[in-house]
Image (cartoon, helix red, strand yellow):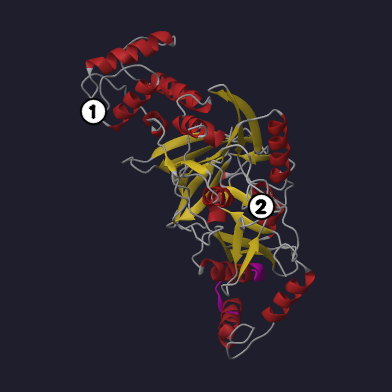
Amino acid sequence: MTLKKQHLVLLLIAAVLLGFAGAFFGMKIAEPEQEPAEKIQETSNAVTDGDGDGPPANMRKVVQTYNLIKNNYLEDVEDKQLIEGAIKGMVSSLEDPYSSYMDIDTMEQFNQSIESSFQGIGAEVSMVNEKVTIVSPIKDSPAEEAGLRPNDQILSVDGESVAGLNLNEAVEKIRGEKGTEVVLEVQRSGVSEPFEVTIVRDDIPVETVYSETKSIDGKKTGVIEITSFAENTGKHFTEQLQKLEEENIEGLVIDVRGNPGGVLTAVEEILENFIPKDKPYVQIENPNGETDKSYSELEAKKPYPISVLIDEGSASASEILAVAMKETGYDVVGKNSFGKGTVQQAVPVGEDGSRVKLTVFKWLSPDGTWIHEDGVKPTVEVEQPEHYYTNPVQVDEPLKLDETGDNIKNIQVMLNGLDYETGRTDGYFSEKTAAAVEAFQAEHDLEVTGEVGEKTAGAIEQEVVDRIRNGKDDLQMEEALNSLYK
């Protein structure tokens, strides 16, 4: 029996979405078939002495510990606290950042309809080396506007350290109602000191597919951006692809940069448009090493060239798409992807609506490659301009002539990216740097001092963010478009 016939909703979840506590893009998770659920319940009630289907005999240690606490602990303890603590302990002992226990409160958030908006900062996170780590900010979200990036580590929330918290506990601190502020302390790779980012929570957009046409050397070219893989993403993608084809596009770019993944069936629906039936578009491997291969009914590849855009924020389902396209002969442009090659299933435990989200499968590429922790290597590697990777600048005292430091280096890189020549980017505040600051201040109605205070730093950062969000200097997109017709 294939996975699809089992009607199991399998998730390729890169992380926990910061908006719901433990919600994965607000996805409703369908109940597994009754028979597997009953089998799980039956074995959970059994105690065995050997390697049978039930728990081992030393599960009695758990019961003994429970009774010991209930009968002897100095203070009263609720049954629920002990039982759920034991479950969380078992799951956390797996040391798998993608497996977790979701209690009733978490499941209420988890079961929010994908069709409704939700509130939070709009970023997906994972636990990487026991650090709460940004996988990707969501398009047009407060997190993106604040400049959060893939691989940023969150150290504290509103002044409280998240060290020692599990992922759901950390998310609970970060999420919140629209209009409220949260202050995150962030450690970024390559930056010596942590910095703080203040984010105003908002409604998070749930639209996942955006399309447009561009003219490249006189050729009409389609661009489809997928921001995540939700329940209706496959349908919406196919509809927009058909519309572009009706406009007689001569090439296509599929952009999954910053896309942290989502639902397996969504990316399957998309790949059925591109991968011919003579090879699988994905393989799912169970714990016994047995694979289930999925095929399309497509006779041949598209008659036009296609490129796929990826970066370090492309994870899970995005990587399924990218590696399948790569192994079918299409170009993949950008930077090496995140590297998540596992599949999770949310299984009911008990009768109160709680679930254990458990890693149950690997996914493999059409050729049988497991990209877990390695990611997908692009066929055409392209870095963005240096100002795409600058960091927020915190200014306590104005930065001025003859001073040095990382903040000055960041300002220099940003000003150069905005076409104000600083003459150097080594962190020394030179006379040419001061002249560039003065030119920026004059053109932005700021007091012309040649020094970088809080207002000037904020204005420079905002100009850079706006430039990036508007697609200016996007060397990766430029290469993806141009490579179509080489």
x, y percentage for residue 12?
Answer: 60, 55
At label 1, the amino acid type is: Thr
Q: Which residues are magenta?
A: 71-80
The residue carrying mark 2 is: 268
- Residue positioned 59% across, 51% down in the render: 317
Distance in Å between CA atoms under marks 2 and 1: 52 Å
**Magenta-colored segment: predominant secondary structure:** loop
- Residue positioned 30% across, 29% down in the render: 409
* Residue 404 numbered mark, or none: 1
- Residue positioned 44% across, 30% down in the render: 475
| Residue 449 lies in the magenta-colored region | no
Mark 2 or mark 1, which is nearer to you? Answer: 2
**250 relative position to 240: left or right:** left
Is residue 240 or residue 7 the one in the foreground?
240
In the rendered image, which quarter is residue 98 located in?
bottom right
**145 relative position to 24: left or right:** left
Is residue 183 or residue 21 the one in the foreground?
21
Q: Earlier in the sequence, mark 2 or mark 1?
A: 2
Establish if 379 lies above or below 417.
Answer: below
| Residue 74 lies in the magenta-colored region | yes
Q: How many marks?
A: 2
Do the residues bearing badges 2 and 1 touch, measured as CB atoms within 8 Å? no
- Whether residue 320 appears in this view of the structure is yes
- Residue positioned 45% across, 44% down in the render: 379
